Image (cartoon, helix red, strand yellow):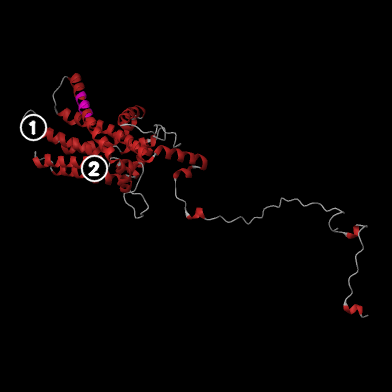
Amino acid sequence: MQLDKTHVVVRVRTLSEIGDLAMVMIRRYPSALLIGFLVGAVPWIIANAALLSWIPIREAQYGLGDDEAAQEVFRYASWMLLLIVLQTPIAGIFTTIYLGQAVFEKRPTWSSVFQEGRRQFWRWFWVLGIKRLVLPTMALLAFRYGTYFDPFADVVLPVTIVIVVVLVRASRPFVPEILLLEQCPIRSKDSRVITASRRSKSLHSPMNSELSGRFIAVSFISCWLFASVLWSLVWVRGIVTGQWNWGLFVLLVLLPASAWIIGALCTLIRLLNYLDTRIRLEGWEVELAVRAEAIRQFGDDAGSLKPRTTESRQTKPLSTKSRPNKSRSKPATSNSGPNPNPAANPTSAPQENPRPSVHGAGK
Protein backbone atom coordinates (compact mmCIF):
# COMPACT_ATOMS: atom_id res chain seq x y z
CA MET A 1 0.00 0.00 0.00
CA GLN A 2 1.42 3.37 -1.06
CA LEU A 3 -0.33 6.24 0.69
CA ASP A 4 0.48 8.73 -2.05
CA LYS A 5 -0.67 6.41 -4.86
CA THR A 6 -4.44 6.56 -4.34
CA HIS A 7 -7.09 5.36 -6.77
CA VAL A 8 -8.97 8.62 -6.22
CA VAL A 9 -7.05 11.83 -6.86
CA VAL A 10 -6.73 13.55 -3.50
CA ARG A 11 -7.47 17.23 -4.16
CA VAL A 12 -9.96 19.93 -3.26
CA ARG A 13 -13.29 19.64 -5.11
CA THR A 14 -16.50 21.60 -5.39
CA LEU A 15 -19.89 20.02 -4.71
CA SER A 16 -20.59 19.57 -8.42
CA GLU A 17 -17.22 17.86 -8.89
CA ILE A 18 -18.02 15.56 -5.97
CA GLY A 19 -21.23 14.60 -7.76
CA ASP A 20 -19.30 13.83 -10.94
CA LEU A 21 -16.76 11.79 -8.97
CA ALA A 22 -19.61 9.84 -7.37
CA MET A 23 -20.73 8.72 -10.83
CA VAL A 24 -17.16 7.66 -11.63
CA MET A 25 -16.95 5.70 -8.37
CA ILE A 26 -20.21 3.90 -9.16
CA ARG A 27 -18.81 2.87 -12.54
CA ARG A 28 -15.45 1.82 -11.08
CA TYR A 29 -16.75 0.11 -7.92
CA PRO A 30 -20.31 -1.06 -8.67
CA SER A 31 -20.07 -3.83 -6.08
CA ALA A 32 -19.77 -1.22 -3.34
CA LEU A 33 -23.46 -0.47 -3.85
CA LEU A 34 -24.74 -3.70 -5.37
CA ILE A 35 -23.22 -5.88 -2.64
CA GLY A 36 -22.15 -3.71 0.28
CA PHE A 37 -25.15 -1.43 0.53
CA LEU A 38 -27.62 -4.19 -0.32
CA VAL A 39 -26.27 -6.45 2.43
CA GLY A 40 -26.48 -3.61 4.91
CA ALA A 41 -29.98 -2.58 3.84
CA VAL A 42 -31.72 -5.97 3.62
CA PRO A 43 -32.34 -6.35 7.40
CA TRP A 44 -33.85 -2.86 7.55
CA ILE A 45 -35.97 -3.47 4.45
CA ILE A 46 -37.48 -6.54 6.10
CA ALA A 47 -38.02 -4.71 9.39
CA ASN A 48 -39.70 -1.75 7.68
CA ALA A 49 -42.03 -4.05 5.78
CA ALA A 50 -42.99 -5.80 9.00
CA LEU A 51 -43.70 -2.49 10.73
CA LEU A 52 -45.59 -0.60 8.00
CA SER A 53 -46.77 -2.85 5.17
CA TRP A 54 -49.99 -3.68 7.01
CA ILE A 55 -51.24 -0.10 6.48
CA PRO A 56 -51.66 -0.16 2.66
CA ILE A 57 -52.65 -3.83 2.71
CA ARG A 58 -55.49 -3.10 5.12
CA GLU A 59 -56.67 -0.06 3.16
CA ALA A 60 -56.47 -1.89 -0.18
CA GLN A 61 -59.20 -4.24 1.00
CA TYR A 62 -61.65 -1.31 0.99
CA GLY A 63 -60.10 0.61 -1.90
CA LEU A 64 -57.41 3.26 -2.06
CA GLY A 65 -59.52 5.96 -3.69
CA ASP A 66 -61.34 7.54 -0.73
CA ASP A 67 -60.06 10.29 1.54
CA GLU A 68 -59.55 8.04 4.54
CA ALA A 69 -57.43 5.66 2.50
CA ALA A 70 -55.41 8.58 1.12
CA GLN A 71 -54.77 9.70 4.69
CA GLU A 72 -53.49 6.25 5.64
CA VAL A 73 -51.36 6.03 2.49
CA PHE A 74 -49.79 9.38 3.35
CA ARG A 75 -49.12 8.06 6.83
CA TYR A 76 -47.45 4.96 5.43
CA ALA A 77 -45.33 6.86 2.89
CA SER A 78 -44.13 9.49 5.37
CA TRP A 79 -43.08 6.94 7.99
CA MET A 80 -41.44 4.70 5.39
CA LEU A 81 -39.37 7.54 3.95
CA LEU A 82 -38.43 8.75 7.42
CA LEU A 83 -37.25 5.28 8.43
CA ILE A 84 -35.13 4.96 5.30
CA VAL A 85 -33.56 8.36 5.93
CA LEU A 86 -32.71 7.32 9.48
CA GLN A 87 -31.39 3.90 8.44
CA THR A 88 -29.28 4.95 5.45
CA PRO A 89 -26.05 5.66 7.42
CA ILE A 90 -26.24 2.36 9.28
CA ALA A 91 -27.12 0.48 6.08
CA GLY A 92 -24.09 1.95 4.34
CA ILE A 93 -21.44 0.80 6.81
CA PHE A 94 -20.04 -1.88 4.49
CA THR A 95 -20.01 0.54 1.57
CA THR A 96 -18.13 3.08 3.68
CA ILE A 97 -15.54 0.53 4.80
CA TYR A 98 -15.12 -0.85 1.28
CA LEU A 99 -14.64 2.51 -0.40
CA GLY A 100 -12.42 3.74 2.42
CA GLN A 101 -10.07 0.84 1.72
CA ALA A 102 -10.49 1.12 -2.05
CA VAL A 103 -8.92 4.58 -1.98
CA PHE A 104 -5.57 2.92 -1.22
CA GLU A 105 -6.13 -0.69 -2.32
CA LYS A 106 -7.27 -1.71 -5.77
CA ARG A 107 -9.86 -4.31 -4.79
CA PRO A 108 -10.40 -4.98 -1.07
CA THR A 109 -11.99 -8.32 -0.33
CA TRP A 110 -15.54 -8.46 0.97
CA SER A 111 -14.56 -10.96 3.64
CA SER A 112 -12.21 -8.40 5.19
CA VAL A 113 -14.88 -5.69 4.88
CA PHE A 114 -17.54 -7.79 6.63
CA GLN A 115 -15.05 -8.83 9.29
CA GLU A 116 -14.17 -5.21 9.97
CA GLY A 117 -17.84 -4.30 10.22
CA ARG A 118 -18.48 -7.09 12.72
CA ARG A 119 -15.45 -6.11 14.76
CA GLN A 120 -16.78 -2.58 15.23
CA PHE A 121 -20.42 -3.64 15.61
CA TRP A 122 -21.22 -2.26 19.06
CA ARG A 123 -19.53 1.04 18.35
CA TRP A 124 -21.49 1.97 15.22
CA PHE A 125 -24.68 0.25 16.38
CA TRP A 126 -24.84 2.36 19.52
CA VAL A 127 -24.19 5.68 17.78
CA LEU A 128 -25.93 5.17 14.43
CA GLY A 129 -28.67 2.81 15.58
CA ILE A 130 -29.69 4.13 18.98
CA LYS A 131 -28.38 7.65 19.52
CA ARG A 132 -29.48 8.67 16.02
CA LEU A 133 -33.06 7.51 16.69
CA VAL A 134 -33.30 4.48 14.39
CA LEU A 135 -34.35 1.93 17.00
CA PRO A 136 -36.43 4.38 19.10
CA THR A 137 -38.46 5.31 16.02
CA MET A 138 -38.95 1.67 15.09
CA ALA A 139 -40.04 0.91 18.65
CA LEU A 140 -42.62 3.70 18.42
CA LEU A 141 -44.04 2.24 15.20
CA ALA A 142 -44.12 -1.23 16.70
CA PHE A 143 -46.08 0.14 19.67
CA ARG A 144 -48.65 1.68 17.29
CA TYR A 145 -49.05 -1.43 15.16
CA GLY A 146 -52.64 -1.89 13.99
CA THR A 147 -53.84 1.59 15.00
CA TYR A 148 -55.38 4.31 12.83
CA PHE A 149 -54.21 7.77 11.87
CA ASP A 150 -53.55 10.13 14.76
CA PRO A 151 -52.60 13.80 14.19
CA PHE A 152 -50.09 13.94 17.02
CA ALA A 153 -48.43 10.56 16.49
CA ASP A 154 -48.42 10.71 12.69
CA VAL A 155 -47.81 14.41 12.06
CA VAL A 156 -46.21 16.11 15.06
CA LEU A 157 -43.81 13.31 15.96
CA PRO A 158 -42.48 12.74 12.41
CA VAL A 159 -41.97 16.47 11.90
CA THR A 160 -40.11 16.69 15.22
CA ILE A 161 -37.89 13.76 14.29
CA VAL A 162 -37.16 15.32 10.90
CA ILE A 163 -36.11 18.60 12.53
CA VAL A 164 -33.79 16.77 14.93
CA VAL A 165 -32.28 14.72 12.10
CA VAL A 166 -31.68 17.80 9.96
CA LEU A 167 -29.99 19.68 12.80
CA VAL A 168 -27.77 16.76 13.77
CA ARG A 169 -26.76 15.65 10.29
CA ALA A 170 -26.20 19.16 9.00
CA SER A 171 -23.72 19.87 11.80
CA ARG A 172 -22.23 16.36 12.25
CA PRO A 173 -22.47 14.51 8.92
CA PHE A 174 -19.23 12.49 9.10
CA VAL A 175 -19.82 10.44 12.24
CA PRO A 176 -19.93 7.13 10.27
CA GLU A 177 -16.52 7.85 8.73
CA ILE A 178 -15.07 8.83 12.10
CA LEU A 179 -16.27 5.57 13.65
CA LEU A 180 -15.55 3.19 10.77
CA LEU A 181 -12.50 4.64 9.02
CA GLU A 182 -10.69 6.60 11.72
CA GLN A 183 -11.89 4.11 14.37
CA CYS A 184 -12.07 6.65 17.16
CA PRO A 185 -13.39 5.17 20.43
CA ILE A 186 -16.68 6.42 21.82
CA ARG A 187 -15.15 7.10 25.23
CA SER A 188 -11.80 6.64 26.92
CA LYS A 189 -10.40 7.08 30.41
CA ASP A 190 -7.17 8.42 28.96
CA SER A 191 -7.47 12.16 28.35
CA ARG A 192 -4.87 11.96 25.59
CA VAL A 193 -7.00 9.63 23.44
CA ILE A 194 -9.03 11.34 20.71
CA THR A 195 -12.58 10.10 21.18
CA ALA A 196 -15.29 10.23 18.54
CA SER A 197 -16.90 13.31 20.07
CA ARG A 198 -13.61 15.22 20.22
CA ARG A 199 -12.73 14.21 16.69
CA SER A 200 -16.19 15.16 15.45
CA LYS A 201 -15.92 18.59 17.03
CA SER A 202 -12.46 19.27 15.58
CA LEU A 203 -13.52 18.11 12.11
CA HIS A 204 -16.95 19.73 11.85
CA SER A 205 -16.72 22.97 13.82
CA PRO A 206 -14.28 24.89 11.56
CA MET A 207 -16.44 24.16 8.47
CA ASN A 208 -19.88 24.18 10.06
CA SER A 209 -21.43 26.72 7.69
CA GLU A 210 -19.91 25.07 4.61
CA LEU A 211 -21.12 21.63 5.64
CA SER A 212 -24.62 22.90 6.45
CA GLY A 213 -24.89 24.52 3.04
CA ARG A 214 -23.78 21.34 1.32
CA PHE A 215 -26.23 19.30 3.37
CA ILE A 216 -29.14 21.50 2.31
CA ALA A 217 -28.07 21.38 -1.34
CA VAL A 218 -27.65 17.60 -1.33
CA SER A 219 -31.01 17.20 0.41
CA PHE A 220 -32.88 19.17 -2.26
CA ILE A 221 -31.09 17.32 -5.05
CA SER A 222 -31.85 13.99 -3.38
CA CYS A 223 -35.56 14.82 -3.21
CA TRP A 224 -35.64 15.59 -6.93
CA LEU A 225 -33.68 12.44 -7.72
CA PHE A 226 -36.05 10.37 -5.59
CA ALA A 227 -39.06 11.70 -7.46
CA SER A 228 -37.32 11.09 -10.79
CA VAL A 229 -36.40 7.51 -9.93
CA LEU A 230 -39.88 6.74 -8.58
CA TRP A 231 -41.68 8.12 -11.62
CA SER A 232 -39.23 6.32 -13.91
CA LEU A 233 -39.94 3.00 -12.21
CA VAL A 234 -43.68 3.64 -12.38
CA TRP A 235 -43.34 4.47 -16.07
CA VAL A 236 -41.37 1.27 -16.75
CA ARG A 237 -44.00 -0.74 -14.89
CA GLY A 238 -46.74 0.91 -16.91
CA ILE A 239 -44.99 0.18 -20.20
CA VAL A 240 -44.35 -3.44 -19.30
CA THR A 241 -47.62 -4.37 -17.60
CA GLY A 242 -50.03 -1.68 -18.80
CA GLN A 243 -50.98 -0.77 -15.22
CA TRP A 244 -50.56 2.90 -14.35
CA ASN A 245 -52.36 3.02 -11.03
CA TRP A 246 -50.61 3.53 -7.70
CA GLY A 247 -51.48 0.19 -6.19
CA LEU A 248 -49.85 -2.05 -3.64
CA PHE A 249 -46.88 -2.85 -5.86
CA VAL A 250 -45.92 0.80 -6.10
CA LEU A 251 -46.41 1.42 -2.38
CA LEU A 252 -44.74 -1.74 -1.11
CA VAL A 253 -41.94 -2.16 -3.68
CA LEU A 254 -41.24 0.82 -5.91
CA LEU A 255 -41.53 3.52 -3.25
CA PRO A 256 -39.02 1.94 -0.81
CA ALA A 257 -36.74 0.85 -3.66
CA SER A 258 -36.50 4.41 -4.99
CA ALA A 259 -35.66 5.75 -1.55
CA TRP A 260 -32.98 3.11 -0.96
CA ILE A 261 -31.36 3.85 -4.33
CA ILE A 262 -31.03 7.52 -3.44
CA GLY A 263 -29.81 6.54 0.03
CA ALA A 264 -26.98 4.52 -1.50
CA LEU A 265 -25.98 7.48 -3.66
CA CYS A 266 -26.04 9.79 -0.63
CA THR A 267 -23.73 7.40 1.24
CA LEU A 268 -21.18 7.67 -1.54
CA ILE A 269 -21.48 11.46 -1.75
CA ARG A 270 -21.05 11.76 2.02
CA LEU A 271 -17.82 9.74 1.91
CA LEU A 272 -16.39 11.89 -0.89
CA ASN A 273 -17.45 15.01 0.96
CA TYR A 274 -15.62 13.69 4.03
CA LEU A 275 -12.42 13.27 2.03
CA ASP A 276 -12.79 16.78 0.63
CA THR A 277 -13.31 18.21 4.11
CA ARG A 278 -10.14 16.58 5.41
CA ILE A 279 -8.19 17.93 2.45
CA ARG A 280 -9.48 21.46 2.99
CA LEU A 281 -9.09 21.46 6.75
CA GLU A 282 -6.09 19.24 7.47
CA GLY A 283 -4.08 19.16 4.26
CA TRP A 284 -4.64 15.43 3.99
CA GLU A 285 -2.84 15.10 0.66
CA VAL A 286 0.33 16.57 2.22
CA GLU A 287 0.08 14.22 5.20
CA LEU A 288 -0.29 11.20 2.91
CA ALA A 289 2.73 12.26 0.86
CA VAL A 290 4.89 12.72 3.96
CA ARG A 291 3.83 9.42 5.50
CA ALA A 292 4.37 7.58 2.21
CA GLU A 293 7.90 8.95 1.93
CA ALA A 294 8.59 8.01 5.55
CA ILE A 295 7.45 4.45 4.86
CA ARG A 296 9.70 4.21 1.81
CA GLN A 297 12.69 5.51 3.74
CA PHE A 298 12.29 3.88 7.15
CA GLY A 299 9.75 1.06 6.80
CA ASP A 300 6.08 0.52 7.58
CA ASP A 301 6.33 1.58 11.22
CA ALA A 302 7.51 5.05 10.26
CA GLY A 303 4.25 5.90 8.52
CA SER A 304 2.04 4.94 11.42
CA LEU A 305 3.07 8.00 13.45
CA LYS A 306 3.18 5.99 16.67
CA PRO A 307 4.64 7.65 19.77
CA ARG A 308 8.01 6.45 20.90
CA THR A 309 8.04 4.18 23.89
CA THR A 310 10.36 4.33 26.86
CA GLU A 311 12.37 1.39 25.60
CA SER A 312 13.13 3.13 22.35
CA ARG A 313 14.69 6.06 24.22
CA GLN A 314 17.09 3.89 26.24
CA THR A 315 20.60 3.35 24.94
CA LYS A 316 21.36 -0.24 24.19
CA PRO A 317 24.41 -1.63 26.04
CA LEU A 318 27.47 -2.22 23.98
CA SER A 319 28.45 -5.75 23.19
CA THR A 320 31.01 -7.35 25.50
CA LYS A 321 32.66 -9.05 22.59
CA SER A 322 36.06 -7.44 21.99
CA ARG A 323 36.66 -6.01 18.59
CA PRO A 324 39.69 -7.38 16.73
CA ASN A 325 42.75 -5.14 16.69
CA LYS A 326 43.27 -4.16 13.11
CA SER A 327 46.48 -2.18 13.75
CA ARG A 328 49.59 -3.90 12.40
CA SER A 329 52.75 -3.75 14.58
CA LYS A 330 56.03 -2.91 12.91
CA PRO A 331 58.65 -5.70 12.81
CA ALA A 332 61.72 -5.19 15.03
CA THR A 333 65.05 -4.56 13.31
CA SER A 334 68.67 -4.71 14.53
CA ASN A 335 69.09 -0.97 14.25
CA SER A 336 66.04 0.13 16.19
CA GLY A 337 64.54 -0.95 19.45
CA PRO A 338 65.83 -3.32 22.06
CA ASN A 339 66.95 -6.72 20.91
CA PRO A 340 64.87 -9.46 22.44
CA ASN A 341 67.82 -11.94 22.33
CA PRO A 342 71.15 -10.22 23.03
CA ALA A 343 73.15 -13.46 22.87
CA ALA A 344 72.26 -13.95 19.29
CA ASN A 345 73.65 -10.54 18.37
CA PRO A 346 77.46 -10.48 18.44
CA THR A 347 77.66 -6.73 18.13
CA SER A 348 75.65 -6.11 21.23
CA ALA A 349 77.45 -4.82 24.32
CA PRO A 350 78.26 -7.30 27.08
CA GLN A 351 75.81 -7.37 29.92
CA GLU A 352 77.02 -5.79 33.14
CA ASN A 353 77.44 -7.95 36.23
CA PRO A 354 74.82 -7.50 38.83
CA ARG A 355 75.64 -5.20 41.70
CA PRO A 356 76.92 -7.21 44.70
CA SER A 357 74.81 -7.25 47.75
CA VAL A 358 75.89 -5.70 51.02
CA HIS A 359 76.77 -9.05 52.52
CA GLY A 360 78.95 -10.03 49.56
CA ALA A 361 80.97 -6.83 49.76
CA GLY A 362 82.15 -7.60 53.29
CA LYS A 363 83.77 -10.88 52.39
Please say if 347 is above or below 147. Answer: below
Counting from the top left corner in percent of width and height, residue 7 is at: 41, 32
Q: Is residue 310 left or right of residue 216?
A: right
In depth, the one of 310 and 34 nearer the eye is 310
Which amino acid type is shown beneath numbered disc 2? Answer: Val
Residue 69 shows which numbered tag?
1
Q: Quadrant of residue 159?
A: top left
In depth, the one of 140 and 334 nearer the eye is 334
Give the magenta-colored segment's residue range.
225-232
Report the Cα–Cα distance between label 1 and label 2.
Answer: 34 Å
Helix, strand or loop status at disc 2: helix
Q: How many marks?
A: 2
Q: Is residue 344 magenta?
A: no
Please say if 27 is above or below 127. Answer: above
The residue tagged 2 is 168
Crowd rating for badge 1 (residues with CA inside 10 Å; few <14, some 14–19, many 20+): some
In depth, the one of 39 and 311 nearer the eye is 311
Please say if 130 is above or below 17. Answer: below
